[in-house]
Image (cartoon, rainbow, N blue to C red):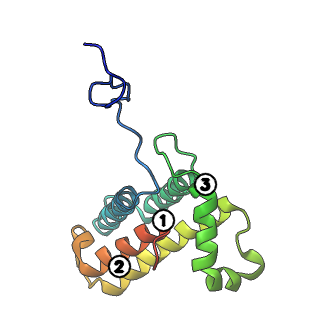
Amino acid sequence: MPSCGYCGHCAKDFSSREPGKPNLATIDVAGEIVSQAVRNTLRRMQEVSEGIISPQEAAAADERLLEWLTQTFSGRNRHFASAEGWNPAGLAQYVREVFAGDLSAAGRHAPRSDAEVIAWLFERFLSGFYDLIHRRSKAQERYLGMENAPDVREFVSFWQGVLVGAPL
């Protein structure tokens, strides 16, 4: 059937049906990444407490996680898309503004490049998560399932907001 070319209802649809890549600049995608990092970290903590893996193996996994998060949110993971200019430059600038006091406290060791700022951010994320878990955990408490605790959910919410530049 020929289209009229005016109404748009009878025009051919040439849009792509291929789903797009997850966009790092959306709160849902950032939240899922942070949530998965939290779940994986809790799983490793449980495995260390049960003697399944060594603390050194867990530390090596943490380093790989930090590297993956840094590469991903620096815009160097081909499996993710981003809003133009957000990863890494916009995110790094946002971090410089939100964490200005902490960055200046680092003095001459403060990160300079956008990639260094994002790496610093994820180091802060992971150390903050360990601090939270150690403050809240009791002796012999299981780590698995802790991702559902209100303070852990609040932690995830904070960090997903940081990663997309939401007002804090």
How many tags in the picture? 3
Local SS, label 1: helix
- The residue nearer to you, when weighing 47 against 127, is 127
Query: Which residue corresponds to mark 1?
Result: 163
In the displayed image of the protein, which residue is found farthest to the top? 1
Q: Position of 69 compared to 94: left or right?
A: left
Per the model, the C-alpha gap separating discs 1 and 2 is 21 Å
Q: Position of residue 63 (x, y in %)?
A: 52, 59
Mark number displayed over residue 85: 3
Give yes or no for contact between labels 3 and 1 (Cβ–Cβ under 8 Å): no
Q: Split into 4 quadrants, where in the image is the N terminus? A: top left
Q: Position of residue 144 (x, y in %)?
A: 23, 67
Which corner quadrant of the image does residue 139 belong to?
bottom left
Name the mark nearer the viewer: 1 or 2.
Answer: 1
Local SS, label 2: helix
Q: Callout 3: few (<14), some (14-19), or many (20+) C-alpha neighbours within 10 Å? A: few
> Which residue: 36% across, 24% down?
5
Which corner quadrant of the image does residue 143 belong to?
bottom left
In the displayed image of the protein, which residue is found farthest to the right? 108
Q: Position of 40 compared to 142: left or right?
A: right
Q: Position of 144 compared to 164: left or right?
A: left
Look at the picture and state if 76 lies above or below 101. Answer: above
Which corner quadrant of the image does residue 51 belong to?
bottom left
- The residue nearer to you, when weighing 50 against 9, is 9
Name the mark nearer the viewer: 3 or 1.
Answer: 3
Local SS, label 3: loop
Q: Callout 2: few (<14), some (14-19), or many (20+) C-alpha neighbours within 10 Å? A: some
Q: Split into 4 quadrants, where in the image is the C terminus? A: bottom left
Query: Which residue corresponds to mark 2?
Result: 133
Per the model, the C-alpha gap separating discs 3 and 1 is 13 Å
- The residue nearer to you, when weighing 43 against 80, is 80
Give yes or no for contact between labels 1 and 2 (Cβ–Cβ under 8 Å): no
